[in-house]
C-alpha cells in the first residue's frame, strides 16, 4: 500500500473494546488515525428504548454516524424524549437544528415553545426571527409581537406600539419579575 493511503477498514472485522458497567455497555473503537468511535447504551429501558443512549464518531462497520435513540439521546444525531445533538428531534430538543414537540432550543428550533436564531413556535417563540402566538425577536410574526420589525394582531415594534400589546407585555413582565 502506498505511503499516506489508508486501507478500507469496512472490509476488516471490527474489534471493539467492550466495557460492561452496572449502568450499561460501552462500545469503543480507536481508528489508526486516532479518531474515536464510542457508544454507550444503558441497560435500563423505557417504552422499548434505552433510558440513555450516547454516540460519538463514525461507526467502523458502516462508516456512518450512529443516531442516538433513547429516552435521553446524546450524539451528533439524536432522537428521543430529551434529544441533544447537532441535529436533534424529540419532545424536548436541544441542538443546532432542534425539532422539538414541546420545546426546541437551537440555531433553528421548533416546538410549542422555541428559542433560537430561527424559532418557529406555536405558543411562544423567542429569537432573531420568530413566530408564535407570542413572538419576541428582531423580526417576529404572531398575535402578540414584541420586535424590532413585527407583524401581527397586537404589535410593539419600531413602527409603533399597540396599547393592547404594551399592556400584555407589561403584565407578562410583572408576572415574571415579581414571582
Image (spheres, rainbow, N blue to C red):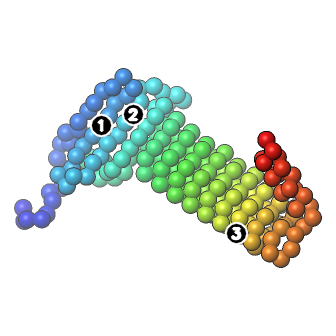
170 relative position to 31: left or right? right
Question: Mark 1 or mark 2, which is nearer the start of the sequence?
Answer: 1
Q: Which of 34 and 98 is in front in this view?
A: 34
- Mark 2 and mark 1 in contact? Answer it, CB < 8 Å: yes
Q: Give the side of residue 100 with respect to residue 74, left or right.
A: right
Q: For mark 2, what is the residue? A: 41
Q: Can residue 62 be seen in this view?
A: no
Of the two numbered discs 3 and 1 in the rendering, the one whose residue sits closer to the viewer: 3
Residue at figure coordinates x 83%, y 60% from the top left: 144
The residue under label 1 is 27
Residue annotated with mark 3:
138
Instruction: Quarter of the image for the C terminus: give it.
Output: top right
Q: From the top left corner, tell me how far across and down residue 63 is, in percent.
A: 29, 53
Q: Residue most toward the bottom?
A: 159
User: SS for tag 1?
Assistant: strand
- Residue 160, position as x, y percentages in the image: 86, 74
Name the image quarter holding residue 156: bottom right
Q: Circle 2 — which element?
A: strand
Amino acid at each position: 500500500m502506498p505511503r499516506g493511503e489508508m486501507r478500507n477498514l469496512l472490509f476488516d472485522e471490527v474489534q471493539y473494546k467492550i466495557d460492561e458497567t452496572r449502568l450499561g455497555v460501552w462500545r469503543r473503537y480507536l481508528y489508526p488515525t486516532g479518531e474515536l468511535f464510542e457508544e454507550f447504551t444503558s441497560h435500563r429501558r423505557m417504552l422499548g428504548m434505552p433510558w440513555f443512549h450516547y454516540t460519538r464518531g463514525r461507526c467502523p462497520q458502516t462508516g456512518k454516524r450512529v443516531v442516538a435513540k433513547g429516552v435521553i439521546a446524546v450524539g451528533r444525531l439524536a432522537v428521543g424524549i430529551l434529544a441533544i445533538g447537532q441535529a436533534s428531534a424529540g419532545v424536548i430538543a436541544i441542538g443546532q437544528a432542534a425539532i422539538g414537540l414541546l420545546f426546541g432550543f437551537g440555531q433553528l428550533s421548533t416546538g410549542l415553545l422555541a428559542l433560537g436564531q430561527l424559532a418557529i413556535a406555536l405558543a411562544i417563540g423567542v429569537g432573531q426571527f420568530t413566530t408564535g402566538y407570542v413572538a419576541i425577536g428582531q423580526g417576529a410574526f404572531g398575535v402578540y409581537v414584541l420586535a424590532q420589525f413585527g407583524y401581527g394582531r397586537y404589535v410593539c415594534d419600531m413602527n409603533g406600539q399597540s396599547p393592547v400589546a404594551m399592556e400584555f407585555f407589561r403584565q407578562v413582565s410583572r408576572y415574571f419579575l415579581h414571582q
